[in-house]
Every structure is written in C-alpha cells, then in structure tokens.
Image: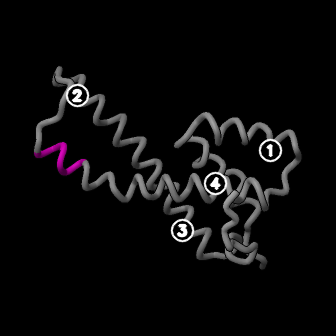
C-alpha cells in the first residue's frame, strides 16, 4: 500500500478544507453537467452531441474530473487514517464512498470531514 506523506496538520488545515470544499463543488458541477447534457440530448432526440459542443464540454470537464479524483482520494485517505467516528458510521460511509462515487465523497466531505476538521477557535 502506498503511504502518502499526509499529516494530520495538513489534512485538518484551513487550506485543505478550502481545497476539498472546492473539489466537492466541482464534483457537484460534474454531476449537474452530466445530468444536464443527457437531458438536453433526450430533448433534441439525439445520442451524440454536435462536435463543437462536445469539444467545449471536454475542456470544461477537465477541472471537474480532476476535482472529483482529488476529492475521492482525499476522503478515502481521511476515512482510513483520521476519521474518529463510531465503527458503525464508518461502515456506512465505506459503503457510500465505495459504491456511490462521485456522490459519496461529496456527502462525506460535507457531513464528516468538514465537521471533524472544524478550526479551533
């Protein structure tokens, strides 16, 4: 197993919270773009997009896909090493993270990660 040099001070830092929140927003944008594109295809009655539209979407999708990938890896890393939840909650989150990508990491980020990494006041 690859052990990344990620410390508790990094994963709980305000910069990491901002980065993972931005990645969660990008994941939501990816989900919305996917749903919207399919809905538009059904409305116009085609299975393919026009070439110009497909090209623009590919360019727009690059940061969204990178954000989803970064969020997925980060939330798994947090789940394995830093999550302080009860074992039953962790088991439920395992199922969501494993089977409901990209939804699972977004929910985990907002409902577990952000709650456990609240800044000390």
Separation of residues labelled 1 and 3 (CA atoms): 23 Å
Task: Please provide percent x and percent y for residue 50.
Answer: 12, 37
- Residue pointed to by mark 3: 19
Separation of residues labelled 2 and 4 (CA atoms): 31 Å
Say if mark 2 contacts mark 4, CB within 8 Å.
Answer: no
The residue sitting at 79% across, 61% down in the picture is: 82
User: Tag 3 or tag 4, which sits nearer the N-term?
Assistant: 3
Q: Quadrant of the N terminus?
A: bottom right
Magenta residues, start to end:
52-57
For disc 3, the neighbor class at 10 Å (few under 14, some 14 to 19, many from 20) is some
Q: Which mark is residue 109?
A: 4
Q: Which mark is residue 41?
A: 2
The residue sitting at 25% across, 55% down in the picture is: 59
The residue sitting at 63% across, 54% down in the picture is: 109
For disc 4, the neighbor class at 10 Å (few under 14, some 14 to 19, many from 20) is many
Where disc 4 sits, the SS reads: helix
Separation of residues labelled 2 and 1 (CA atoms): 39 Å
For disc 2, the neighbor class at 10 Å (few under 14, some 14 to 19, many from 20) is some
Where disc 2 sits, the SS reads: helix
Q: Quadrant of the C terminus?
A: bottom right
For disc 1, the neighbor class at 10 Å (few under 14, some 14 to 19, many from 20) is some
- Residue pointed to by mark 1: 90
Task: Please provide percent x and percent y for residue 64.
Answer: 39, 54
Q: Quadrant of residue 75?
A: bottom right
Reply yes or no: does residue 73 show up in magenta.
no
Separation of residues labelled 4 and 3 (CA atoms): 11 Å
User: Tag 4 or tag 2, which sits nearer the N-term?
Assistant: 2
66 left or right of 58 in image: right
């Amino acid at each position: 197993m690859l052990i990344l040099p990620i410390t508790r001070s990094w994963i709980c830092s305000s910069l990491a919270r901002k980065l993972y929140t931005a990645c969660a927003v990008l994941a939501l944008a990816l989900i919305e773009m996917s749903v919207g594109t399919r809905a538009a295809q059904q409305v116009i009655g085609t299975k393919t997009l026009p070439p110009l539209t497909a090209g623009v979407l590919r360019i727009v999708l690059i940061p969204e896909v990178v954000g989803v990938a970064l969020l997925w890896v980060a939330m798994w890393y947090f789940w394995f090493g830093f999550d302080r939840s009860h074992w039953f909650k962790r088991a439920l989150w395992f199922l969501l993270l494993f089977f409901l990508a990209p939804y699972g990491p977004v929910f985990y980020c907002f409902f577990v990660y952000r709650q456990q990494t609240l800044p000390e006041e």
